[in-house]
Amino acid sequence: MADAMNLDSRCYPEYGYDGRRVGRRLFRDALANVGRRGRRRPVRRLSVLVDSYYQNDYLVEVMRTTPGMDSVLAAPALQRLEELQVELRSEFCQTGHEYVLPASRVPWRSLRVLDLYGCTLGPTAAAAVFGRLETLKMVFCWASLEGLQSMVDAAPNLAGIWLERVMFEGEYAVISKRRVLLRCPAATAAVTVIDCSRTDGLDIDAPGARSLCYTGFLEHFPFGPAAPPGNLEHVQLSFCTAPRCANPPSSREAPPRAVFWESIGRFSCLQVLKLKLLDINDIAVRPEEEDVFLKPFPDLKFLELQGSYEVDSHGAAVAIANLLRCCPALHEFHLRCKLHGDRYAHPRRSLHLSDEKKARLDLEESMESFKRLKSQKIITSPSSSADDDDADLAALHKACSFPCLESHLRKIRLEFELKCFDCFEVRLAKFLVENALVLEEMEVHDGDQRVPDHIHRHLPVWRANSSRRKIKIVGEYHKGSCA
């Protein structure tokens, strides 16, 4: 594109690891490009990538060598800049302090997109008004809370804000115990907060938000009770409840289930909800507490739940029952079960195995799994009852009714690793097939065990007394089959 300019440190391999020479050449070439005679079109999009295969000192040398990034931003040809992307990456020891982007030098009158990775956001000019800024994305960046708030205040049309591993300046002993607040304009519709864990929580005041993507602690949920968005429709959450996550909450008086339902239950307009938990049973609500915690999501159409149930499969069933009961209009349900929910658990084998050894170990594991499954008794006979060996699913079987199963749920996707033919997921699939009255499709992915064959064979038994229409069974090895 004639109006785009891409600066990439990797284009100068002849200078090796000499960051000063690379920086001098990189920015001199950029200035020569924008200053050459005959250039009529201004630069609308500027992308800067500095990549170090070793230490962070290379980033410092490249970015702080004359003429430098500041000279490029000050060039007349960039005063109509609309998109600015700055990406600094180092294999080792990167801190985010290698370069400070002077927000006062950024062409604030025309800028629509600001995308930063691995640098520090400097102060904004006092008179700056980012009237066209629509997207602000910061990943692995530093900023002062006051400076970031000043930029957001100066961007009345900011539609999306993405803060990932953003660290606020200040003494760690103080800031790590402080819950901070960032106010967004009414135009902000999309909010992303991922692992901003240097504080005791980052609250986002975004009254116009319609979507939220959040990764962090339950207790650090970014939409506080004071002024939650009234029209939140799309939510994607990845909660950490393990003590080994970075900077755990200073206070944990309430159990996870209480924090979860108090945080999420306020958003009655949700249409899409994606949940990722370490342990699914963390959000399970016992029958005697349902009236206290459970809140309905009358408009929710899509639900995705991911996590482990190895600690308490009965609790996982309770959590699933809670969610099905609270989503009466649910059309599509995805469940992704993992054997190990702790993302900090050590892998069973070294990361340095050769491809040949990995392939051999994978083959051995597959053969062992196949032998184990082959030796087990196939579940379910025509005369078996729904309650046989189903203590884990008691919460589902004892429920009077789930409105979504009676009239709305049409597609189910299950992802898991088959441990036995009578495992929790297979019995859950059986329950859903028997009770989802308008179910049209069930998609099953279980790794290498071909469980769709198993479910396909038993589907007529599971639904022997049903007059419902055929269900399409889709698996990893099947394009589709009906029974």
Image (tube, rainbow, N blue to C red):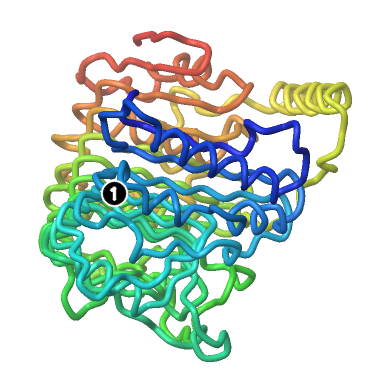
Q: Position of residue 44 (x, y in %)?
A: 29, 38
Q: Is residue 316 visible?
A: no
Characterize the local packing of mark 1: few (<14), some (14-19) or many (20 or more) Cα atoms within 10 angstroms.
many
Looking at the picture, tell me which residue is in the foreground, 428 or 350.
350
Q: Is residue 148 above or below residue 394?
A: below
Q: Is residue 143 visible?
A: yes
The single residue placed furthest to the front in the displayed view is 37
Q: Quadrant of residue 81?
A: top left
Residue topped by disc 1? 273
Q: Position of residue 202 (x, y in %)?
A: 37, 74
Q: Residue at x 16, y 44 (%)?
A: 403
Name the residue type under label 1.
Leu
Looking at the picture, tell me which residue is in the foreground, 198 or 482.
198
Q: Residue at x 21, y 35 (%)?
A: 331
Looking at the picture, tell me which residue is in the foreground, 225 or 177.
177
In the rendered structure, the answer to whether residue 72 lies left or right of residue 45 reads: right
